[in-house]
Image: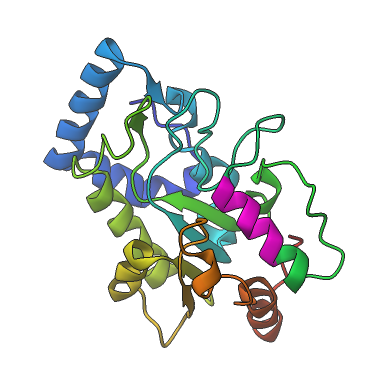
Amino acid sequence: MTARYDLSWEPIFSELFQQPFMQQLSAFIQEERAKHVVFPAEEDVFRAFKLTPLAEVKVVILGQDPYHNVGQAQGLSFSVPAGMAIPPSLRNIYKELADDIPGFDAAAAGDLSAWAQQGVLLLNATLTVRAHAAGSHQKKGWERFTDALITYISAHCPSVVFLLWGSYAQQKIKLIDTAKHKVLSTVHPSPLSSYRGFFGCKHFSQTNRFLEENGLTPIRW
């Protein structure tokens, strides 16, 4: 794997890359790329960490898997490149934003890079996937890697808002110092669950309120 990320992450990345489980994961992904199409492209695997330096992390939105269809995955959870059809979960995120944040453009493109550049770490628990095979790279080591990063963020960053949507993301609360950070939890924004609590959760305005209360610039959603 080619590491392409902001150098502020180097202390924790270099430590993790030396671990045997990451060397095994790297070998697995190289073999997968030799035999199959794997998303995202190699240069985008760590894109979330390129666009959001460690010292600028203000919000963490945790997803599970990259998108597994052609042209969608770009290394940012829930995000797709401009010009791609907006996936159902992101469409529901935009619906909640339109209800929660005055002036939000619900017709916005699906590329969330602008959020990442403001300090929103768009982190998937698993950073790669085989084309058209959801979950194919789970339990190969990525979860251990991203759990370590969540723990590191909790320890080294002040006043972060963690948005944990769905039961999988909510399991990560054990890695977070809840006395130091703000954790907002609800159901996943997928069409299967969004009407059971995601709509009306007001997580985006709550996030900005917490940031402002802690002397930080709110996110321009």
Q: Tell which residue pokes out farthest to the top in this image.
A: 34
Indicate left or right for 136 with 160 as reference.
left
Q: Which residues are magenta?
A: 88-96
Number of marks in the rendered image: 0
Q: Which residue shows up at 50% across the image and 23% down it?
A: 70
Q: Dividing the image into 4 quarters, which one contains the N terminus?
A: top left
Above or below residue 153? Residue 37 is above
Image point (40%, 45%), residue name: 10
Q: Position of residue 88 (x, y in %)?
A: 57, 47
- Residue 35, percent across and down? 25, 12
**Is residue 94 magenta-colored?**
yes
Q: Give me the residue at 17% from left, 43% from top.
A: 19
For the point 60% across and 37% down, which residue is it? 80
Asked if the magenta segment contains residue 87, the reply would be: no
x, y (%) of residue 183? 47, 78
Q: How is the image coloured?
A: rainbow
